[in-house]
Amino acid sequence: MEFAIDQALEIYSGGLGFLTGSHMRSAHDLGQHMVGIGMLWKLGYYDQGRNEDQTLCVDWQQKLYAYLEDTGITFTVNIHGADVWVKAYYLPPYVFGSAPLYLLTTDFAENDEVSRTISYRLYDGNTATKLAQYMVLGIGGGKLLDLLGYDAEVYHLNEAHALPVAFHLHNDKAEVHKRLVFTTHTPEEAGNEKHPFDLCLEMGYFGGLSKAVVQEATGIYDDSFNLSLAALRLAKGERGV
Amino acid sequence: MGEAWRYLRDRPHHECADYRYWADTELYEAAARGDDAHLAVRKKELKRRAFLTVADQTGRFAGYKRADLLLRDREWFERLVSNTQYPVQLIWAGKPYPADQGAIDLFNSLVQLSHRYPNVAVLTGYELALSKLLKQGADIWLNNPRIPREASGTSGMTAAMNGALNLSTNDGWIPEFIKPGVNGFLVPEADYRHLDVNEQDNHDAYHLYELLEKHVLPMYYQRQQEWTGMVKQSMADVRVAFDSGRMAREYYDKLYV
């Protein structure tokens, strides 16, 4: 969801981004065979300014990154019954010394305004927008790897934001279990996101899988869907702290 | 989330931060040579750049992080910031979640407070660059989340990589790192299971003031050698266990196979 790789690439908010940024730089230094997938947040997390009396002013300013390469790859993710176009940009390793990173955006002419806003704000406050962000990251990320012919052996979810990739991969449960790794840094119940199961379903969060299939796969039969719990149960390995 | 603990036995180490990006190598080189004098000179130079910082507190201003714990006893706080024998510079920085009005209000109340003291500052734009500057400049990295709410709180790792000492409650990554009085300062743990939040905050604030007034500041000002020894220990310990190169290797070799 966020990577703090360099000050100049403002697609991060805090600790989680600092951690993934460190991970991507170390993976680069170690020459590990991996790529990262994140979102190209048009307005970032926000710019922290001040009002006249020095109190905090939240500014939203568009970011432009000349050093990102347009891969020319576009595809769609079905969100709430409509196809949303997704485009992939690329941060090559030589720019900041990090493992290859693909950044997804919905902010281009093929989409209507609502769809474009999906990639505007990191951790958007609106629940539906947030779920759409997770779908672009998860389902979109999975589709991108397919289009690149990357043939990933392992999909590592750092926190549950990209969980929909599990539903994208869901040929059978054993296959997902074999290839999905989940790490979490918020073992506390309150820190883990839950959303109405039916809203997730309506949004297409489960990538077209039926409620019964998702319930069976995740063991979650509540009215609310706990993203971390689902990730934990679907993944082969996880790591709590 | 009991299941979260199921795989803990075999898990790779805790969250980490990469040494190459974050650490001040000149500090590490001086420590390796045993050149304490240069270590002190270098830290001063870094501090000059970050304008004489002593204690920092940074983060999202989430409630449990208690950015205002140091203000809990206003008289004691006054005494601390107006102490001329052991002067301190306090700096707060962080980007509250924009929809979290409570966090924004807290940030603004600290801004108001800072207007009353020449040695209290609240900075905006806490991103990678400012984060690095503050870590380089800080002598003490203050981290006082309410146990057991902190999942991680990794900023203290990279602060340690730049010669700052952690002063913290025993939560997040701290229990795996800290040796009190050897590589950092630890607020004694409250019996939080049997205390309400108010009592826990009182307990922690009391011990935080005590530590600062009786141990941390006197050592910083009176026993420079001891301080430098702790800084070197902290730099070494954090590099061994919390460099993200190790985390990336363990992910790759253990978790991804």
Image (spheres, coloured by chain):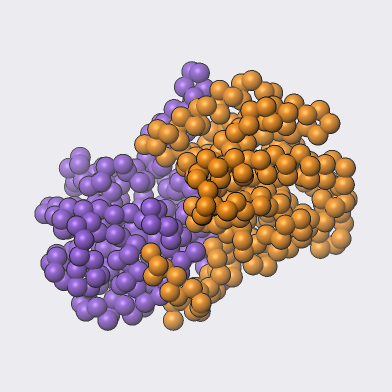
Q: Is residue B65 above or below residue A177?
A: above
For chain B, the rendered hue is orange
Could you tell me which residue is drawn at 77 percent across and 45 percent down? B216
- Residue B175: horizontal and vertical position, in percent? 61, 61
Q: Is residue B217 visible?
A: yes
Q: Is residue A96 visible?
A: no
Q: Is residue A81 left or right of residue B25?
A: left
Which image quadrant is residue B138 in? Answer: top right
Q: Which image quadrant: the N terminus of chain B?
A: bottom left
Q: Nearer the viewer, residue B197 or B183?
A: B197
- Residue A199: horizontal and vertical position, in percent? 17, 53
Q: Which image quadrant: the C terminus of chain B?
A: bottom left
In the rendered image, the residue lying farthest to the front is B194
For chain A, the rendered hue is purple
Could you tell me which residue is drawn at 27 percent across and 42 percent down? A126
Q: Is residue B232 above or below residue B167?
A: below
Q: Nearer the viewer, residue A20 or B62?
A: B62
Q: Is residue A200 above or below residue B176?
A: above
Could you tell me which residue is drawn at 73 percent across and 28 percent down? B79
Q: Is residue A9 above or below residue A92?
A: above
Q: Nearer the viewer, residue B243 or B2?
A: B2
Q: Nearer the viewer, residue A179 or A226?
A: A226
